[in-house]
Structures are given as structure tokens and as C-alpha cells.
Image (tube, rainbow, N blue to C red):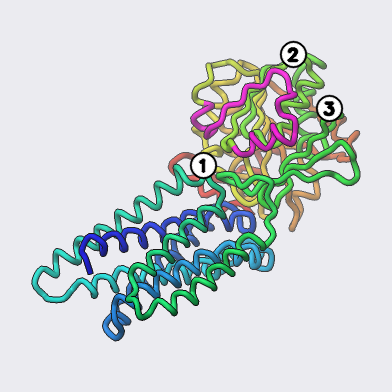
Amino acid sequence: MNARFARFVVLVSGAAILVVETLATRLVAPYVGLTLESTTAVIGVALAGIAAGASLGGRWADVFPPRRVAAGALAAGGLGVLAVRPLVRLLGPVLGPGPVAAILLVAASTLVSVTALAMVTPAITRARLTTVDGSGSVIGELSAAGTIGSLAGTFLTGFVLVTFLPVTAILLITAAACLVLALLVVEDARRSALTRGGVAAVLLAVALVAVPGRCDADTVYYCARVDADPERASAQVLVLDDLRHSYVDRADPAHLEFAYTQRFGDAIDAAFPAGAPLRAVHVGGGGFTMPRWLAATRPGSTSTVLEVDQGVVDLGRRELGVDEIPDVDIRVGDARTTLAALPDGSADLVVGDAFGARSVPWHLATTEFVDEVRRVLRPGGLYVLNIIDRDPRALLAAETATVAGRFVTVALLVRPDQLTPGGGGNAVLVASDRAPDLGALAAAAAARGEPGSLLDDAATRALAQDAPVLTDDRAPVDQLQT
């Protein structure tokens, strides 16, 4: 086999493995979340597949003609790549969330393709080793080619492909490259078998498209869609992955449907004069519910929205009328960096709504981030933060301890049943350097049918008394959240 062609084959197979690995994190997120645990599952399964493939490829290349082994591995890998998304869509709802489910889902959908593609390098190496002389150079060159391919697959997928192409298209292109390369590698006499494999590939490609998807937009971070509310004609729900994230009523922008957004509203109204315009910063945009509410209830307010996902912003503009909201400045990027670019004392209010039910951006939960929030707030400004956690509520306690360590006064808006054994859900942490109007907060909660849903500063700090403070050096949020 020609040395240059051998290096190219190994490079492509290495790239394909990392394309699958990079996309796997995104593909399984709707079912198991985008967490450290799900990322660990993807990396672990990929490494297991690479190890198994390297062993199998080497053994089979000693028994069978190595070119045929390489061609068969490329064909099997291509077919496996085509099967990844249908398998995720079929098995994800069955397996459900959790770390064990993440491992099983990733393994069931990607292990075959990764193992097959990892067989290519040892098979091609065996094909190139016609003599012991120069074997070190051959092995080194092919190993380097595989690593370069892996790097190319990683950076190309993460920085380019997912930005411009849907996941389905990336998988189709990757599978097609593997199948075409298999035809080029195999000896002429064996191409009939690969022709049959081509028929199977066509069927799998049809399955890739035919298995129903649930996304209006397949963004860099989410499978996002907008659903209508059958009980409220003018309302829409933004669903990110499979979780209801935002509720928007364009005909009645003052309407807050979700309880945690109502608690946001209560905290804001208790802290500032009625109807007074505010300068707000929103950590997380989603459906832009709170900027819309501020514009409707406090005309003249300005909202700077820090949203990491351009795809969510674009979907909001298309489906949720985001451009209808006055005085909104949207800054796409990670909130840790976009917040750092805002001037000192430039906001009356910071709304934290970036924590999910399955994953928390850890770097937005630390003392260092809270210090940035304080810097941006004017003296006496208000920080409200949505935290989702269940019994034993370790994340709620740790984040409360973290915020309480940086503000003079804190309060927690949470139903009493959420703090009982087995309870949980959304809790809203309220922080400021001036005491909140507890009477107004309690009255608002009672009016909404949530009497007793207020912990004052002393009770809130007691809840977090023994909890660790989260820092950039140590913030195990995935392990803390239940």
C-alpha cells in the first residue's frame, strides 16, 4: 500500500472517531443532560472502543489480509456512524436520565462505530509492514497521522461543523467518507461485499432522517423547539432538550406562568418602587421571559441579555418575537466573559437563570462569578438566582452559602414542601446589600397561593450553614445536584 495513501486512511479514520465522540455529548444531552458525568461517559466509552478496536484490528490483520480488515472496519464504522442518531433517539427515552443511563446510551449508540474505526490503524500498519527494516518509521508515521486526524476531527467539529451544519448532515458526511474510503482500500475482488454494505448504508441513511426528531433548531448546545400551549392560545413554551425552559405570552407579556419567574417578579417588585424603570442584566436568555416582563411592567427598563447559544437567540427571534421587546441588548457568549465586559455599577438588577434541572454551568456558580455580579450591580442592587435541586438539596445549600458569603443579606423563596424529605424543585435566592421588604415578599407569595414560602436571612444562612462554598478551584456542581 502506498505510504501517502496509508497515512490518509489512518488520518480520516482518526478524524471520524473524534467527530463521533464530539457529537455524542450533544446527541445524548436531551436525555441525560450536558454534565460532567455525561461528558465522562462519552470519553470513557470512546477510549474503551479505541482500545478494543486497536486490539481486534491487530489480531485480525495477522489472520486475514490486512487491506480487507481495514476496508471492512471502515465500512462497519461508516454504517455505525449512520446508526448513531437513530439509536440515540430510540433508546434515550427508554433509558432516561442519570449517570448509568448516560454510559449505556453512549455505549449503545457509539461503541460499535468507534471500535470499528479504531481497527483501521493497526490493519493499515500491518499492511505497510512488509519487512522489519524501517518498521519504526512506519509505525511512528501512522501513529502521528492518526493523532493528527483526531485533532482535526475535534477542532473541525467543535469550532466549524456544528456552527454551520446540523448534526444529521455531519454524521452523513462522516459516514460517506468512511464508506468511500473503504471502497478505495479494498481489493477489487471483494468490492461486491461492500456493495451490499452500501445498500445497508442507504437504508441506515433513510433511518437517520426518518426517525422523528423533536427539534425546531439543533443548536450548538440544545435540541430546541417551541410548543404551543393548548390551554392559552397566545402562549408558547420554549423546550430545551426535553425540559420546559421558558413560557412566553406575546399577547400578555406581563404574564408569568412558571412559579420561579413569579418569584423573580415578587422579589423585583419588593425591592424597587412600582413601575420604576430598571437597568437589568440577565444571565441566560432562553425565551426572554423576564426582559419581556420588565418592558411591560416597568416601561423604560433596559435589559442586557447574556446568552451563550446563538441558535436559541435565532429561534427566539423567529418564533417568540424577541425583536419585539424594546431596549434589549443581546450579547452572545459565555456569561462569565460577557459579564466581565460590563461596567462597574451599571445594573440595578441581575437575574440568574442559567441553571438547568440536569446540568449547571459550574463557572457561573462560584464565588468568583458572584464577585463579578456584585461589581456590575450598583450599591443596593438586587441579585435573584434560580436554583433547581432536590433532596438532599446539596447544590441549593452550597450555592446559597456561596452567594451569602458575598452579600449582606439573603432570602430564599421556596415552598415549605420543597424542603421536606423527598422534596425539591425551583428555589429563588434573593441577595442584596440592603434588607428586602419581607412583608411584601410574604404577602406576594400568599397571594399566589404559596403561603410560608419565604426564608429570611437567618433561616437562609442556617440552611447553608454546613455547606461548602463553591470556588473556581472546587465546584463539583454535577455531583451536588440531585
Indicate the quadrant containing the C terminus: top left, top right, bottom left or bottom right: bottom right
Say what amino acid the circle numbered 2 marks.
Answer: Gly
Whether residue 457 is visible here, answered yes or no, is: no
Indicate the quadrant containing the N terminus: top left, top right, bottom left or bottom right: bottom left
Q: Mark 2 points at which residue?
A: 300
Whether residue 342 is visible here, answered yes or no, is: yes
Residues at marks 3 and 1, CA–CA distance in whole angstroms: 34 Å
Badge 1 element? helix
Residue at left 66%, top 54%? 392
Badge 3 element? loop
**Residue 228 in which image quadrant:** top right
Q: Which of marks 2 and 1 is in front?
A: 1
**Labels 3 and 1: the sequence-earlier one:** 1
Inspect the magenta stretch and tell me whether residue 287 lies in it: no
Task: Point out residue 264 in the picture as x, y percentages from the top left corner.
Answer: 75, 32
Local crowd size for mark 1, using a 10 Å CA cut-off: few (<14), some (14–19), many (≥20): some
Q: Nearer the viewer, mark 3 or mark 1?
A: 1
Local crowd size for mark 3, using a 10 Å CA cut-off: few (<14), some (14–19), many (≥20): some
Say what amino acid the circle numbered 3 marks.
Answer: Ala
Local crowd size for mark 2, using a 10 Å CA cut-off: few (<14), some (14–19), many (≥20): some
Q: Mark 3 points at which residue?
A: 254
In front here: 16 or 345? 16
Q: Name the residue under label 1.
A: 163
Residues at marks 3 and 2, CA–CA distance in whole angstroms: 15 Å
Say what amino acid the circle numbered 1 marks.
Answer: Thr
**Residues shaded magenta:** 311-339
Task: Point out residue 30 in the picture as x, y percentages from the top left corner.
Answer: 63, 54
**Residue 460 in which image quadrant:** top right
Kindly give the residue lying farthest to the bottom in the view shown. Answer: 63
